[in-house]
Amino acid sequence: MQDVQWGKFNMIEAERRLLANALLDLSNQRFVLLSESCIPLFNFSTIYSYLIKSNKTFVESYDLPGPVGRGRYNPRMKPHIQLQQWRKGSQWFEMDRELAIEIISDRKYFQVFEKYCKPACYGDEHYIPTFVSIRFWNRNSNRSLTWVDWSRGGPHPARFIRTDVTIELLERLRNSNGMECEYNGKRTNICFLFARKFLPNTLDRLLRFAPKLMGFN
């Protein structure tokens, strides 16, 4: 056990340790990072089928001008990482076994981040998105499977309390708020399998709605 602090580089180290331990079980083929405030939007069999049949990974990775995107890039990362290669994204990833092995085996980019990604550079928002964009962009969907609400502004997404949880909200999330995305070359409205941030006091309502709405037994 090692202490991990929000915003510190040891979050990346922790993620790599989680992947390394999960890889020890040869039956594990897909790897999903979730937080304690995440909820599933579908039942297990639906989520399992979506992941195991996907021909791409789900790591959000995009180029963001401004202080919280390109502004966090350190020029001393050159020549290994150029500004035009710098990416930002959600830390809540999903990946296959091949990509997980590449991430825990990486020394080149990991050492650059370890040396030069200091506050206000947050490695959990940049290391894996940048690594995947440089090395495996053609195998990645460039989107996260975890929905969050950033509409209220600030450094953290909105938090949902008990009274926020309604059948209408859950149905909207299950239908991706009306948006579409690509899955195995086809358009679909199932873009998110998980959602956050749901506080502990939402559990009673989630358990009440889940059997009928989400198909839980």
Image (cartoon, rainbow, N blue to C red):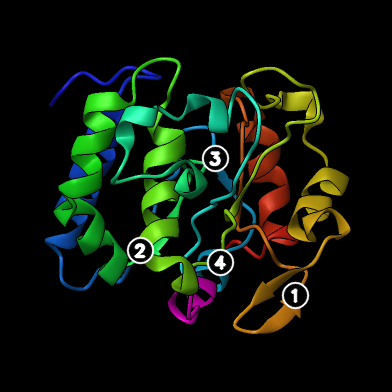
Task: Name the foreground residue: 106 vs 65.
Answer: 65
Residue drawn at x 50%, y 61% as measured from the top left? 58
Q: Position of residue 19 (x, y in %)?
A: 24, 51
**Tag 3's secondary structure?**
loop
Q: Quadrant of the C terminus?
A: bottom right
In the picture, measured across the screen, residue 125 lies left or right of residue 141, that is left
Q: CA distance from mark 4 to mark 2?
A: 13 Å
Please tell me which of labels 4 and 3 falls first in the chain: 3
Task: Name the foreground residue: 135 vs 101.
Answer: 135
In the picture, measured across the screen, residue 181 lies left or right of residue 138, that is right
Please tell me which of labels 1 and 4 falls first in the chain: 4
Please tell me which of labels 4 and 2 falls first in the chain: 2
* Crowding near the residue tagged with mark 3, few <14, some 14–19, many ≥20 C-alpha atoms within 10 Å: some
Q: Position of residue 78 (x, y in %)?
A: 32, 39
* Crowding near the residue tagged with mark 1, few <14, some 14–19, many ≥20 C-alpha atoms within 10 Å: some
> Which residue lies under the disc numbered 4?
141
Amino acid type, residue under disc 4 in the picture? Ser
> In the rendered structure, which segment of residues is drawn in magenta?
48-56
> Which residue lies under the disc numbered 2?
135
Q: CA distance from mark 4 to mark 3?
A: 21 Å
**Tag 2's secondary structure?**
helix
Please tell me which of labels 1 and 3 falls first in the chain: 3
**Tag 4's secondary structure?**
loop
Q: Quadrant of the N terminus?
A: top left
> Residue 188: which disc?
1
